[in-house]
């Protein structure tokens, strides 16, 4: 047996272990590389959890994962983009690339009970589902948002979400190529407090009355979230295409508008006629509120 182990074609147990690890690592590397598709992949709806409302009702919060790294997918409301029950629950029909969290909320009554709210999306020949439930383990709060969105803020704070409202009508009309100015008002409680600059092992606090220095926020390159503030921006309005009837480019200037004196403005330009729903998110770095404007482009 000893001679057999040392004969050509056989290896020691240590050599076999190294070979096995190399095979596993190589297979993992190939598999990982194959998951980075630019296009052609489907959209996975995601249930983020539920929130309590003051009136006893609940918000079920949803996001999604577009598995593509470049292709933005459009799936109209209907058999391929539907809720059960309800069909149209305000879900997006335009899906940005990669993971987009906390994109919309569905309000359900206080007597919803143990029923599921199912969001089904079919794209590129694949059908995926997200199951909303009021099971206690799925309850989310400020801390869940903070951990998932890498937001700033001192420990122990109790942040309230900002509130956003459109200035002007919720339905607009504009010609192709002509800029449309959208203005919103935003109210906020001033929280979260930007983290004080760290120095050595302690915190360096600013002088009394001075604003604390803002620590750059850590961003997760895997999520590539569209709705997130730029580093150094404490309160802003972020615009996205929520729904569109045609796969045409929409340009926002700026996409992320800082709130000044309770207001924020952006200009949007369309490259093709059609119907669009634009969504503006008021973002304080952790919590969100949103408003929609419907635009008919001539």
Image: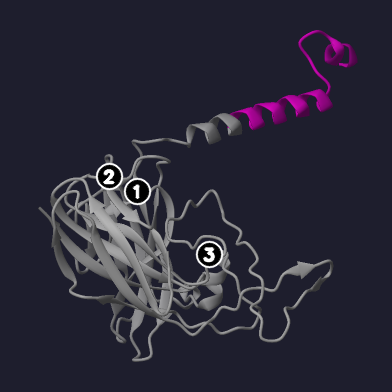
Q: Is residue 41 visible?
A: yes
Residue 158 is situated, as x and y percent measured from the top left of the image, at 56, 85
Quote the CA–CA distance across marks 2 and 1: 6 Å
Return the residue found at the far right: 2
Nearer the camera: disc 1 or disc 3 = 3
Q: Is residue 57 magenta?
A: no
**Residue ID for mark 1:** 43
Residue 4 drawn in magenta: yes
The span picked out in magenta is: 1-27
* Circles 2, 1 touching at the beta carbon (< 8 Å): yes
**Horizontal and vertical percent for residue 267?**
29, 59
Residue under numbered circle 2:
123
156 lies left or right of 50: right
Nearer the camera: disc 3 or disc 2 = 3
Near-viewer residue (181 or 5): 181
Q: Which mark is residue 149?
A: 3
Q: Position of residue 168 (x, y in %)?
A: 21, 75
Q: Residues within 10 Å of mark 2 (few under 14, many from 20)?
A: some
Q: Is residue 97 above or below residue 114?
A: above
Q: Secondary structure at mark 2?
A: strand
Let me know if residue 132 appears in the view.
no
């Amino acid at each position: 047996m000893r001679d057999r182990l040392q004969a050509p074609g056989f290896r020691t147990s240590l050599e076999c272990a190294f070979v096995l690890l190399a095979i596993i690592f190589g297979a993992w590397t190939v598999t990982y590389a194959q998951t980075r598709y630019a296009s052609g992949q489907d959209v996975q709806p995601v249930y983020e959890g539920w929130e309590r409302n003051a009136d006893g009702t609940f918000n079920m919060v949803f996001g999604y994962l577009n598995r593509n790294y470049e292709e933005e997918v459009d799936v109209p409301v209907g058999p391929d983009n539907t809720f059960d029950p309800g069909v149209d629950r305000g879900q997006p029909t335009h899906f940005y690339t990669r993971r987009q969290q906390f994109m919309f909320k569905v309000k359900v009554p206080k007597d919803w009970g143990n029923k599921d709210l199912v969001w089904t999306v079919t794209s590129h020949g694949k059908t995926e589902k997200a199951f909303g439930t009021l099971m206690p383990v799925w309850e989310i709060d400020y801390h869940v948002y903070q951990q998932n969105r890498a937001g700033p803020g001192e420990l122990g704070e109790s942040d309230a979400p900002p509130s956003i409202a459109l200035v002007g009508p919720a339905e607009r009309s504009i010609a192709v190529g002509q800029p449309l100015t959208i203005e919103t008002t935003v109210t906020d409680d001033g929280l979260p407090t930007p983290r004080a600059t760290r120095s050595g092992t302690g915190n360096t606090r600013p002088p009394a009355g001075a604003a604390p220095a803002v620590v750059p926020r850590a961003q997760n390159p895997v999520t590539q979230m569209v709705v997130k503030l730029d580093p150094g921006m404490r309160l802003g309005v972020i615009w996205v295409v929520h729904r569109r009837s045609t796969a045409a480019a929409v340009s926002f200037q700026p996409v992320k508008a800082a709130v000044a004196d309770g207001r924020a403005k952006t200009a949007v330009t369309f490259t093709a006629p059609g119907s669009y729903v634009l969504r503006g998110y008021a973002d304080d770095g952790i919590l969100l509120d949103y408003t929609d404007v419907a635009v008919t482009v001539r």
